[in-house]
Amino acid sequence: MRLLVVEDEEDLVDALRVGLVRAGYAVDVAYDAPSAEEKLQVNTYDLVLLDLNLPGGDGFQLCRMVRAAGNGVRIIMVTARDRLDDRVRGLDEGADDYLVKPFAFPELLARVRALLRRDTGAGTSVLEVGELRLDTARMEVTLGGRALALTPKEYGVLHYLMTRPGHVVSTEELLEHVWDEHADPFTNTVRVTVGNLRRKLQVEGLIETVISRGYRLREAP
Ligand code: CA
């Protein structure tokens, strides 16, 4: 899953980036409102962490712009303002959740997980497809009870596929949702990562290649 962190405090950005990448997310950063606007137009994000007080604009405007463009990306407003009317306004402008600084990182992660699973139908932090089980809180993956040691990208690809079992997911879509903005669009990194993931799964046909369209995770029988 790919996140955009919109925040101008560099120390906080650095801490967030390290923590979020460690938690298995691809992370892009925008330090001001105009670059956030541009990235939101160019890239596809699964969730945005949005500061309110930004150079060149504010989070309320950005949120309104995103929603006016019909973009349903999940948004968590993160801000030092803790006044009730700001929280109400943030939610009314289209934010899905609101977190007041200072916050505890585990709480932020839990809110991110909770929002990201809204689309998947999963009621908890655990995704299950057939014998595959992926715990997004612990970053643990098992297949038929056997623990799999995955790299962050392998984990990201499997996580994304497990949110769409039975659906064809293109290479471009995986690149958009599992890699950050520094990924080379002409690279074969997706193919290599899927190949390594298949070897670790050791189950023939669990991730199918659908010729000229992409990959499909076999649904539960
Ligand atoms: Ca700020």
Image (tube, rainbow, N blue to C red):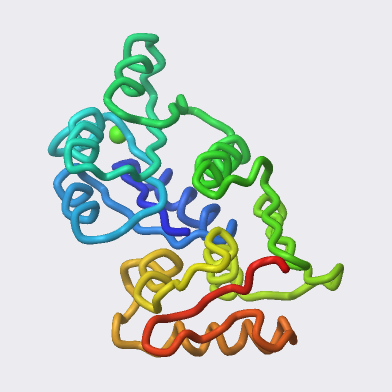
- Residue lying furthest front: 221
Q: Position of residue 213 (x, y in %)?
A: 38, 82
Q: Nearer the viewer, residue 2 or 8?
A: 2
**Residue at the spot x=35%, y=88% of the render?**
187
Q: Position of residue 52 (x, y in %)?
A: 29, 30
Q: Is residue 10 above or below residue 51?
A: below
**Residue at the spot x=31%, y=81% of the render?**
184
- Residue lying furthest top: 84
Q: Is residue 140 above or below residue 67?
A: below
- Residue lying furthest right: 145
Q: Is residue 5 above or below residue 185?
A: above
Q: Quadrant of ligand 1?
A: top left
Q: Position of residue 69 (x, y in %)?
A: 18, 43
Task: Say which quadrant the C terminus sits in.
Answer: bottom right
74 displayed left or right of 155 = left
196 displayed left or right of 160 = right
88 displayed left or right of 131 = left
Q: Nearer the viewer, residue 131 or 173?
A: 131
**Residue at the spot x=44%, y=86% of the render?**
189
Residue 197 falls in image quadrant:
bottom right
**Residue at the spot x=18%, y=31% of the render?**
61
Residue 9 falls in image quadrant:
top left
What is the total number of numbered labels drawn onto the structure image? Answer: 0
Q: Position of residue 180 (x, y in %)?
A: 38, 67
Q: Nearer the viewer, residue 151 or 44?
A: 44
